[in-house]
Amino acid sequence: MGMAPDEVLRLRMRAQRLRGPGAASPEDALRRLLAVQAQEFPYAQWSLAQRAAATSGAVTAADIEKAVGDGRILRTHILRPTWHFVHRDDLRWLRALSGPRLEQINAVTYRQTGIDAAAAARSAGILGSAVADGNHLSREVLASKLHDAGLPAKGLKLAYLIMHAEITGVLVSGTPVRSPGGALKQTYALFDERVPAGPEWTRPEALAELACRYFTSRGPATAKDCADWSGLTLTEVRKGLQLTVEAHPDTLAETVIDGVVHYYGAGGDAHGGSGTAGPRIDLIQCYDEYVMGYSATRHYMGGGAPAFPFQGEPMHVVLLDGRMAGSWRHTFRPGRCEVDIRPAWAEPPGSPLAAAVQDAVDRYAAFTGLPTVRVQPGA
């Protein structure tokens, strides 16, 4: 018997640690999810913090920033490819698994920007030498190093030369630096100086590890969901699933919904309660794994958030009991954080929904460490 949509959502929220006991730390939350999309750095920090518990209060942006600075959490191009947070203990095997596929995906852009094998290899040598011995450099400085070596690059060509160096295990994120305006700025470091030696898995072993980690942290989900999330082929995902089931038959459970098999971590209680009394509001980034972790089955979450908002409108996602139900964004002002929340429901003052929204704002305030207030649209 298949699951009802509400049961699917309850299991996903728990598997992703958006409900129930949080992970022991941001690093543990990341290890569970394997990779967390991280284009929008401040919002991506929040994605980790809201899944983790802390013995001395909420996990803060400063906690995540320190983990990134120390290299426990790395930010690099991996999977589809796009920016992701990955734990340093997972990046080496995950890069080896997905790197060849990423090079295939990027091949068209390499040709369009004039990046052939010789240029890519020369660039990687220049960039690797520039960041050696703990010399973490910004993208702008790396561009100047290439220019000085007679390989000028800017715009898309520069971005893909650096991405090629990430994909091939030359560069990885370094310790961020603050711009004069206070924003964190990405730097790059030598991959082998930031990423410890790890297990040298065969490709089938790595496929099994990815499948196991994906479905236990995001299930119920389909093989197509996993393929689209990982950038691997559907054949490879199915191979990973087969190997996982053969080696660890008690790890995954299955359910058939609308004729399609969904996999999830065995032992989950699909029929349990939500774990909260009354409505629950969650503010998540638009690239959160609760959204980006699915493609074929994203419809379970509803359609109450704009995929392509109009200019000036917030694009991040408000969840009401696990379903998309509005949009939001933050704006940092001197000494405070303003949150613009636009729900897709009527919100009478003093109602349980209004209290749930305020609770979500309070949780975000604890994360930012700043007085955080809700502002009206256009304010």
Image: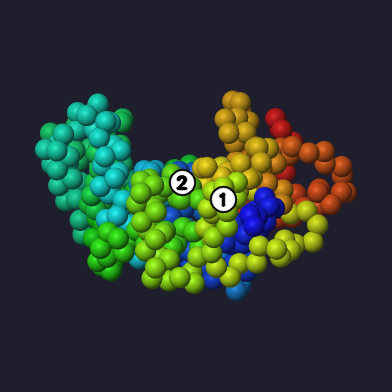
**Considering only vertical position in the picture, is 352 above or below 92?**
above
Residue 147 is tagged as: none
Camera-nearest label, 2 or 1 = 2
Q: Quadrant of the C terminus?
A: top right
**Considering only vertical position in the picture, is 117 above or below 171?**
above
Quarter of the image holding residue 103? Answer: top left
Query: Do the residues under discs 2 and 1 have CB atoms within 8 angstroms?
Result: no
Q: Position of residue 35 (x, y in %)?
A: 43, 55
Q: Nearer the viewer, residue 293 or 48?
A: 293
Residue at 39% in and 61% down: 242
Q: Which residue is mark 1?
A: 290
Residue at 28% in and 31% down: 109
Amino acid at the residue labelled 2 = Lys
Residue at 24% in and 53% down: 169
Q: Position of residue 290 (x, y in %)?
A: 56, 50
Question: In the picture provided, is 372 more to the left or to the right than 294?
Answer: right
Q: Earlier in the sequence, mark 2 or mark 1?
A: 2
Q: Secondary structure at mark 2?
A: helix
Q: Secondary structure at mark 1?
A: helix
Q: Which residue is mark 2?
A: 224
Amino acid at the residue labelled 1 = Tyr
Mark 1 crowdedness (10 Å alpha carbons): few <14, some 14-19, many ≥20: many
Question: In the picture provided, is 144 more to the left or to the right than 379?
Answer: left
Q: Is residue 152 visible?
A: yes
Q: Nearer the viewer, residue 29 or 244?
A: 244
Question: In the picture provided, is 158 more to the left or to the right than 221?
Answer: left
Q: Nearer the viewer, residue 86 or 276?
A: 276
Cα distance between the residues tagged 2 and 1: 16 Å
Q: Is residue 332 visible?
A: no
Q: Quadrant of the N terminus?
A: bottom right
Q: Position of residue 5 (x, y in %)?
A: 67, 50
Residue at 60% in and 30% down: 309
